[in-house]
Image (tube, rainbow, N blue to C red):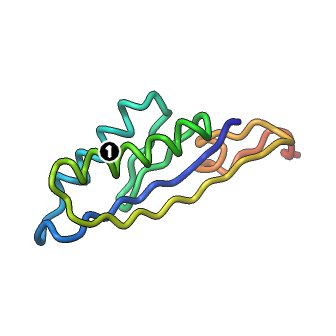
């Protein structure tokens, strides 16, 4: 099932700057094969729902293995069965089936 999602990973207990851990989480997302749009406070993705969920799990597994003691992750997921939705449609506010 295709989904759109926003993933926000917050490393806790690694110091004031978490740039390296956030960069690592974003690399894991990019390596997943999902369509990716980085923004200031998270990452938007488009792709298979199972891949999105597996990617979030992989982030937790790998960052913990690399020494991050705590992670707080917020995930928003949207799925539709009535039409195909894309990140571009959401960002631009364009839904071709409803224009007019």
Image point (71%, 45%), residue name:
94
Image point (46%, 54%), residue name:
7
**Which residue is nearer to you in this view: 74 or 83?**
74
Image point (71%, 47%), residue name:
79
- The answer to whether residue 70 is left or right of residue 32 is left
Residue 80 position, x and y percent, is: 77, 46
Q: In the rendered image, which residue does mark 1 sit on?
A: 26
Residue 67 position, x and y percent, is: 15, 55
Quadrant where the N terminus sits is: top right
Q: Is residue 7 above or below residue 31?
A: below
Residue 32 position, x and y percent, is: 42, 31
Mark 1 surroundings within 10 Å by alpha-carbon count, few (fewer than 14), some (14 through 19), many (20 or more): many
Residue 35 position, x and y percent, is: 50, 33
Q: In this view, does 13 lie above or below 5?
A: below
Q: Place residue 70 in its image quadrant.
A: bottom left
Q: Place residue 46 in its image quadrant.
A: top right
């Amino acid at each position: 099932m295709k989904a759109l999602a926003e993933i926000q990973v917050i490393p806790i207990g690694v110091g004031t700057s978490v740039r390296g851990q956030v960069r690592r989480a974003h690399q894991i997302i990019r390596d997943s094969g999902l369509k990716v749009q980085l923004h200031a406070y998270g990452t938007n993705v488009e792709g298979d729902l199972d891949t999105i969920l597996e990617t979030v799990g992989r982030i937790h597994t790998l960052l913990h293995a690399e020494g991050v003691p705590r992670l707080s992750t917020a995930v928003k997921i949207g799925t539709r069965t009535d039409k195909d939705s894309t990140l571009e449609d959401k960002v631009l506010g364009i839904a071709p089936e409803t224009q007019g």
